[in-house]
Image (cartoon, rainbow, N blue to C red):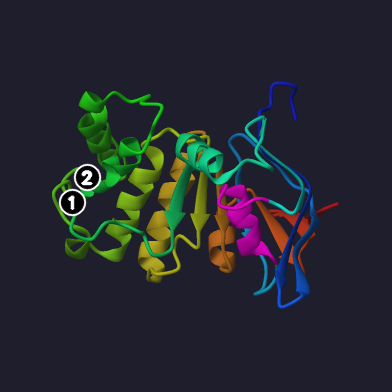
Amino acid sequence: MSAATRTIIETQDLTKIYGMDGVQVKALDNVSIRIEAGEMVAIMGPSGSGKSTLMTILGCLSTPTSGRYILDGEDVSSLDKVQLAAIRNAKLGYIFQSYNLLARTNALRNVMLPLVYDRTHKVPREQWEEKARAMLESVGLGDRLDHQPQELSGGQQQRVAIARALITDPVLLIGDEPTGNLDSKSGSEIMKLLLKLHEQGATIVIVTHDPTVAAYTDRVIHLKDGCVDAEVLNGTSPVQ
């Protein structure tokens, strides 16, 4: 890596322990990973591997029990809920399996929603609609601005969700099984769109169980029993 490389994600000995009925479960066990700006990385693992727990920490939805998580140069390991919410809105864009669109709200207003909650007001209110329109056009839905989710196909709904994730110019896009509710054709179209965003410089992390999805990425981090089991560069042998 060159000296100018910008690290977006760095975790150091990340550990997450859940306690229930006096029993402690270690969901993550000293996980250390690093993701540079412009990378597209998949996180895979069987049920119980810790991939969902890792995603919630990387997405600033929870904090580790121990270890450090440095997001775009800022240690967010011990921030409170309010601080984490501010980080999420300022730096992260989410793409969910179930789209998470407001049902009785058109595509344009669904895409504008993150700007409503952006307390930094980096996009002036008078520019919200213009920017949302541009985001929808960028994902091929410039002719669906007034359509509500029920009037769109699954693939189109996911495109709206991607446009919404992009509108705050996040440093990181996080996809949680982004093709999980789609047929193979629509899923392929969504992955090609994410690949296009990656080629334009976006940093993307995708949590998936689907090797077809993982094959689109630069690198796959495999988790097992809460630990990093292997890191594989696509088309090459495992990273040592």
Of residues 88 and 162, the one drawn nearer to the viewer in this rendering: 88
- Please tell me which residue is depicted at 76% across the width and 75% down the height of the picture: 22
- State the SS at label 2: helix
Q: Residues within 10 Å of mark 1 (few under 14, many from 20)?
A: some
Amino acid carrying label 1: it is Asn
Q: Which span of residues is magenta-colored?
A: 50-63
- State the SS at label 1: loop
Distance from label 2 to label 1 (Cα)? 6 Å
**Residue designated by label 2:** 109
Q: Is residue 71 left or right of residue 180?
A: right
Tell me the number on the disc at residue 106: 1
Question: In this view of the protein, can residue 191 be seen by the observer?
Answer: no
- State whether residue 71 is above or below residue 188: above
Question: In this view of the protein, can residue 157 be seen by the observer?
Answer: yes
Where residue 203 sits in the image (x, y, percent)?
55, 40
- Please tell me which residue is depicted at 31% across the width and 45% down the height of the picture: 139
The residue most toward the left is 146
- State whether residue 50 is above or below residue 74: below
